[in-house]
Amino acid sequence: MTPLQLASLTASTSLLAGWRLYLVTLVTGLAMHFGWIALPANLHQLDILASWWVIGAAGVGTFAEFFADKIAWVDSAWDTVHSVIRPIGGALLSAAIVDSSNPQWQLVSFLLGGGAAFVAHAGKAGARALVNTSPEPFSNILVSTGEDVATTGLLALAIANPIAAALVAACLVVASIWLVVAARRAIRSFLDLVITPTIRPRPAPKPPR
């Protein structure tokens, strides 16, 4: 892989980690173990991702997240727990792909990767909080399945064509930021609608004639 392709792969994996950290780790580990990703020989620190212990742990996390993410409000609790885990995981994945002989680039990659994962996670959590207000359960399952398909598809694209995947990932960053803003506005409107009438003072009763 060329440096540009490695940077593109870093951007894609760190962003997708904000959606599905365990799935990203699982697929990346399998891709490295079976040689689907041709990494430079000096990136020995990534060998840990190809370990069957890491792949197994990521597989368990992927299985648990697959079902937890499709149950309304359970997914929000899951997202809350992973508000720190996903950004850290995305940052570590991003830093691991960069050449360890250049600590400056590793630090930059760590910060940018963590930021991208956090933005993606915030957009996902905000969007799912809005979906959970729907009384029927099917929209939650539909959105979660769409995230599974999108994450898997982008990971496959990142392995086959990292640069194209990075361009798609950049569009997803913009979409995630928009989702965060839209979620804040929707929640604020909902609170104004529910809370304002309850705190508004009632008119004084008219004196009897």
Image (cartoon, rainbow, N blue to C red):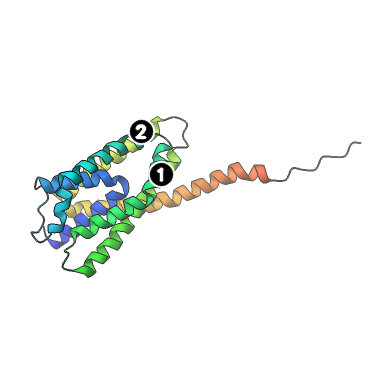
> x, y (%) of residue 115?
33, 58
Q: How far apart in space, not on screen, are marks 2 and 1 (Cα)? A: 13 Å
The disc placed on residue 179 is none
**Residue beneath the point at 72% across and 45% down:** 201
* Mark 2 Cα-neighbour bin, 10 Å: few <14, some 14–19, many ≥20: some
Q: Quadrant of residue 8?
A: bottom left
Residue type for callout 2: Ile
Residue 5 higher or lower than 140, as above or below? below
> x, y (%) of residue 164?
20, 52
Q: Quadrant of residue 198?
A: top right
Q: Nearer the viewer, residue 141 or 56?
A: 56
> For mark 1, what is the residue?
127
Q: Nearer the viewer, residue 126 or 94?
A: 94
> In terms of secondary structure, where does tag 2 sit?
helix
Residue type for callout 1: Ala
> For mark 2, what is the residue?
141
> In terms of secondary structure, where does tag 1 sit?
helix
> x, y (%) of residue 148?
28, 39
* Mark 1 Cα-neighbour bin, 10 Å: few <14, some 14–19, many ≥20: some
Split into 4 quadrants, where in the image is the N terminus?
bottom left
Q: Is residue 85 visible?
A: yes
**Residue beneath the point at 23% across and 40% down:** 59
Split into 4 quadrants, where in the image is the C terminus?
top right
> x, y (%) of residue 104?
23, 70
